[in-house]
Image (tube, coloured by chain):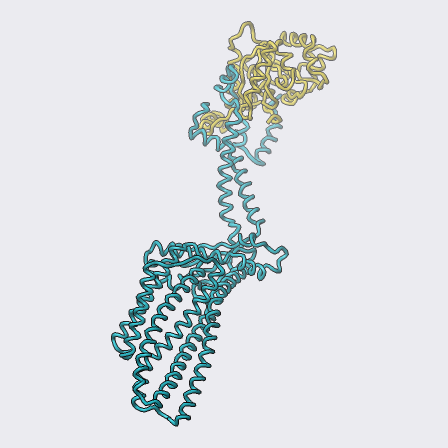
Amino acid sequence: MNETTLDLKEMLKIIKKRYKLIRNVFLVFVILAVVISLIIPPTYEAVTNLRVKQPKGLGDSLLADLPVDSSAHTKQLMNTYAEILKGRTVMQEVIDQTQGDKEEVPTYEQFLKRITTEPVKDTEILKIKVTARSPEEAEWVANTLVNTFLERMTFLVRAEQSNVRAFIGQRLQESKQELEQSEEALQEYKTQQKIVDPAEETKAMLTKLSDIDKLAAQNKADLAAAQATFGVTQQQLNQEKSGFVADSPLIQQYKGKLADEEVQLVTLIANYTDKHPQVAATRAAIEATKVKLNTEIARVISADAPSMNPIHIGLVQGRIQAEAQIAAGAAQNQAINSIVSASERELGTLPVKEQGLMKVMRNASVNQEIYIMLAKRYEEARISEVMEPTEVQVIDVAIAPDKPIMPKKILNVLIAAICGLFVGTGWAFLKEYMHKTIRTAEDVQQYLDMPVMGSIPDFTIRDKRQRTGRWSRLAQLVQRKLPWGG
Amino acid sequence: MSQHYQLIVQQDAKSPIAEAYRTLRTNIQFAKIDGELKTLMFTSAGPGEGKSTTAANTAIALAQSGKKVIVVDCDLRKPVQHQIFNRSKRGVTNFLVEDLVVTNLIQDTGIENLRVLTSGPIPPNPSELLGAARMQELLEALQAQSDYLIIDVPPVVAVTDACVLASKVDGILLVLDSSAVHPPEMAQRAKELLTNANGHLLGVILNRVEIEEEHAYYYYYYGNEKKKKA
């Protein structure tokens, strides 16, 4: 027997010879796998899907259209949300809610192991998997987790919104007082001067001024809202880290352009009605510039701070937008003031009585306008405060799984079967080659250097082959009784 | 299989195994050796390799060729020849210890030309008994009465009995079980021991040689045919 060559026939012979060993190892592996699979307590997994939308502003970013950057951004956003979800604040609350009655309350680290977040490729879906000992628990924990996460998100977003609302609310209160005062003044003037209606001439002038007054009111409300946002974001940002300035020549340029356009609008409004094509065009231009400005801001922010969390990005963005609005609003305000002073000179031509009436009426109407605008803003702020954040939506609510994910019985048994087969065969070969034995005449020559006088075949094998079981024993008994000896 | 003794050469004379024993017989009869080859010792490296069965069957094969053969069971530790031939245990030790005539102890086996001297009761000191001068006497007395003397002894590596007798016999046959897991070192050790004891090793008898199935078919052809006729 040549030890270095291992031909197929030899291998088959060995396998045939060690068939029992291979079979036993195989069986032991399979039985072990079955037993272990039965012993291991089953683990259930509940799955829930979240859709993570890109925040407003970033969504219509010019760069969002570029596929590579967009997907990288989405990925980054998903990871951020996943981290918030797996953060200590959210987790601890889920533990308290769902694990509180357990004998052994898991720690944050232990609990974290049971939760897997995985972004679904090329989508905005974040898959959250929760494992537990029972299907009900898996479902419960998964849904509690998502709810807590959403609550946390809402909390983070609302903190900003409620500040804005409070600020506008304050302004609204002030404006209401002003309105009441001016209305009282108007009423008083009317009774004092015994005037009920203004003269025709005055009426025409009022109409002419009303548009610019309306614009002034809107300007005021806008400024108030922008200042509120600015104040809130600034305050929250200061709590985080300072020193982040997103400024670029392009932003500056857009800011200037926006201010110019706002001033232009004011001049146009002074002469034409809203329906005038030039007014409409200017308004459209303002909107376009705003969009561009926001886009640029978003780009600068996301480029400068790629790893920031979306809430922070939102704050920064809000602050810069507010800043731009304040700048534009201030420019507009000046323009409005100059027009108003020009028209006031015109008013000087009217009779004194009419002038006085005009003043109080305008005052009252401006204040009313401001009040209405602020009230509108206030409602808006209130709505957005109570609105659920829409960046994250629950696509699939977790349901109790039917079957446990662990232990995977069939897979385990299959692996064990394959392993058993390999180990058994390997063992058989190892045994065959480790335990060298003298089997053939060549072996005798090799090891002992002696001739083989005789080779007696194994008759026990033949016996086994020809007669087995009870019949063979019976035959042997009969044979022993036979008088073959003498 | 050490307990399942079969005198296959006698029971199934046309079986391939009987044929193998006859080949062995021929090899023994025509072995190249200085002087005559009358006393043959069958031993093995370890226990259970089938030396007693081989010795008995070889003895039958030699007897069938018309030679007078005596089987002597010198395995005074685990004797089996009396079981194989189903005869009384009285034998070698009785001769060595008591003052008896050897002829009275030799028993017929029922096979022509073949007689057996069984071991006798198991003594406390087998090695010493086998080395005694009386043993030499016994061998000489037996040699005088036969053409071939087949001696069954304990395994070489385990006990020294075989080595004690090694120089007193004409040839030694080492039975090796080829089916057992058998480290070659053990057989080499057996050879070394016997050579050192001045024994003349004739060669090896490979026992329980595996026959592959496809060969077995031809192997048993004649045997089966005979059975069908019978």
Closer to us: A184 or A369:
A184
Residue for point 43% across, 73% down: A380
Closer to us: A294 or B86:
A294
Closer to us: A403 or A106:
A106
Q: In which quarter of the image is the C terminus of chain A?
A: top right
Provide residue A100's location: percent of width, then percent of height: 61, 60
Q: Residue furthest top?
A: B35
Q: Quadrant of residue B130?
A: top right
The shade of chain A is cyan
**Is residue A381 in sight in this rendering?**
yes
**Is residue A75 in sight in this rendering?**
no
Residue for point 47% across, 28% down: B212
Q: Residue furthest bottom?
A: A194
Q: In this view, does A275 lie to the left or right of B103?
A: left
Provide residue A351's location: percent of width, then percent of height: 32, 90
Q: Quadrant of residue B76?
A: top right
On screen, residue A75 above or below B104: below
The shade of chain B is yellow
Provide residue B89's location: percent of width, then percent of height: 69, 19
Q: For the image shown, how many numbered marks are present on the structure?
A: 0
Provide residue A449's location: percent of width, then percent of height: 51, 15
On screen, residue A294 above or below B162: below
Residue for point 31% across, 62% down: A253
On screen, residue A258 above or below A5: below
Q: Which residue lies furthest to the right in this view?
A: B98
